[in-house]
């Protein structure tokens, strides 16, 4: 079955760009059955959906982060990526990649039953 | 954005107790609601989708109800493995949004 795994630096300096990659295994990222999302969770707090990408490259970003977020896809590597620019301490969080092959429609994933293990990114000098 | 408000923020209960958590949406979302269980250091796990449907492999002691703006998750007989934090999430409108969470603690 499809599995997701996040990777990237665990420490980013303020004002720099956070970059993470999610590797998809057990299936093709180019399958039309999935939208690929990023979700984050600050330590001890709730979950925030960042945005998603479809294999075609079509994206949707949370308006709260839209000016700083870029999600891209590399079908040759079966990976999708997150870039978040101008980070501050408020961007310190566990970042998850997530999806579903079951709970989606033409607009995107509605519910998530596929999650990576998450990766903690700390923004600090 | 649709705001999701959960209550209570925490609940203390014993094994065997019946526990109900509520979630309110800031506007009507039909039955586009999911519940997730999250244990410390782990990713969330889907429990309920479409407000009342049990995700595959989830024990039948979990149930969901509601539509429109008011929803609830009930655990009929709390088991030791159910102590966790539960989140609701609306799937009606993008951006998708989550509630603040309810921590189910051991009394």
Image (cartoon, helix red, strand yellow):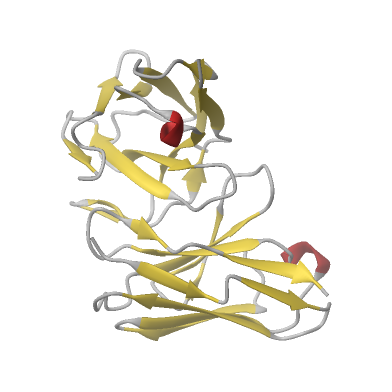
Is residue A41 visible to us here? yes
Above or below — where is B16 with respect to A56? below
A31 lies left or right of A45: left
Above or below — where is B24 with respect to A94? below
Above or below — where is B12 with respect to A20? below
Q: Quadrant of residue B45?
A: bottom right
Residue lying at 23% horizontally and 35% vertically, measured from the top left: A54
B105 lies left or right of B64: right
Residue lying at 83% horizontally and 79% vertically, measured from the top left: B14
Q: Quadrant of residue B28?
A: bottom left
Is residue A34 visible to us here? no
The percent coordinates of residue A85 (x first, y second) are 29, 22
- Total marks shown come to 0
Nearer to me, A44 or B14: A44
Nearer to me, A96 or A40: A40
Nearer to me, B98 or B9: B9
The percent coordinates of residue A72 (x first, y second) are 26, 23
Nearer to me, A20 or B101: B101
Above or below — where is B39 with respect to A29? below
A84 lies left or right of A63: right
Q: Among all residues in the image, which is located at the extreme front?
A: A125
The percent coordinates of residue B22 (x first, y second) are 50, 80
The percent coordinates of residue A121 (x first, y second) are 52, 26
A53 lies left or right of B100: left
Residue lying at 77% horizontally and 84% vertically, measured from the top left: B17
């Amino acid at each position: 079955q499809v599995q997701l795994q996040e990777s990237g630096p665990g420490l980013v300096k303020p004002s720099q760009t956070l970059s993470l990659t999610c590797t998809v295994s057990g299936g093709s990222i180019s399958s039309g059955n999935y939208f690929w999302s990023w979700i984050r969770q600050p330590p001890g707090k709730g979950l925030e959906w960042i945005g998603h990408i479809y294999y075609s490259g079509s994206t949707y970003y949370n308006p709260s982060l839209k000016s700083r977020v870029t999600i891209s896809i590399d079908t040759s590597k079966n990976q999708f990526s997150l870039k978040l620019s101008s980070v501050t301490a408020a961007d310190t969080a566990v970042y998850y990649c997530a999806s579903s092959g079951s709970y989606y429609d033409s607009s995107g994933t509605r519910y998530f039953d596929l999650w990576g293990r998450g990766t903690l990114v700390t923004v600090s000098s | 954005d649709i705001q999701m408000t959960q209550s209570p923020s925490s609940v203390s209960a014993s094994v065997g107790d019946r526990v109900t958590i509520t979630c309110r949406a800031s506007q009507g979302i039909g039955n586009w609601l999911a519940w997730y269980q999250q244990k410390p250091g782990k990713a969330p796990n889907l429990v309920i989708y479409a407000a009342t449907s049990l995700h595959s492999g989830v024990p039948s002691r979990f149930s969901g109800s509601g539509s429109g703006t008011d929803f609830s998750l009930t655990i009929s007989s709390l088991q030791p493995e159910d102590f966790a934090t539960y989140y609701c999430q609306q799937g009606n409108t993008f951006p998708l949004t989550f509630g603040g969470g309810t921590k189910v603690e051991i009394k």
